[in-house]
Amino acid sequence: MNRTLTALATAATLTFGGTAAMADAHAGMMNEGFNMLQTALMADFEQLGIPTDTLDDLTLGQIAAIKAVVEGDEANPEKKGRIEAIIANN
């Protein structure tokens, strides 16, 4: 009986402890990816004449929307207008 309880306690500790460690690692990777997206957009913002200090205040959804605009086929003035509209909705 004691072995069974000890085994269950050990399994629970490993399961939940491992989950927390994996969550921390996943959060770190997500943050790293978010920072990479911000850095990639910095050059695009500079090219379009948009202040780069606004990048720090954007959500992941806004960054994804802006990235889609940047990669689109529109001319730069239209891209700039659409990006500024996305930023204004922050």
Image: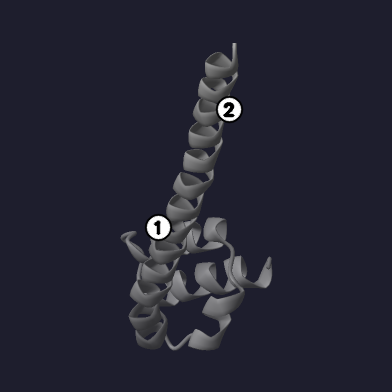
Q: Are marks 1 and 2 in contact (CB under 8 Å)?
A: no
* Residue at image mark 1: 29
Mark 2 is on which residue type?
Answer: Ala
Please indicate, yes or no, whether residue 53 appears anywhere in the rendered image: yes
Q: Residue at x 50, y 54 (%)?
A: 24
Disc nearest the viewer among 1 and 2: 2
Disc on res. 3:
none
Location of residue 35 by image quarter: bottom left
Question: Alpha carbon of mark 1 to alpha carbon of mark 2: how far?
Answer: 30 Å
Front in this rendered view, residue 78 or 42? 42
Closest to the observer: 19 or 13?
13
Task: Kindly give the residue lying farthest to the top in the view shown.
Answer: 1
Residue 69 in view of the camera: no
Q: Position of residue 82 (x, y in %)?
A: 52, 67
Q: Could you say whether the residue bearing mark 1 is in a helix, strand or loop?
A: helix
Residue ID at (59%, 11%): 1
Say which label, 1 or 2, has the lower sequence index: 2
- Report the amino acid beneath label 1: Met
On residue 9, the disc is 2
Q: Nearer the viewer, residue 10 or 26?
A: 10
User: Is 85 displayed left or right of 15 in the figure?
Assistant: right
In this picture, is 34 found above or below 2? below
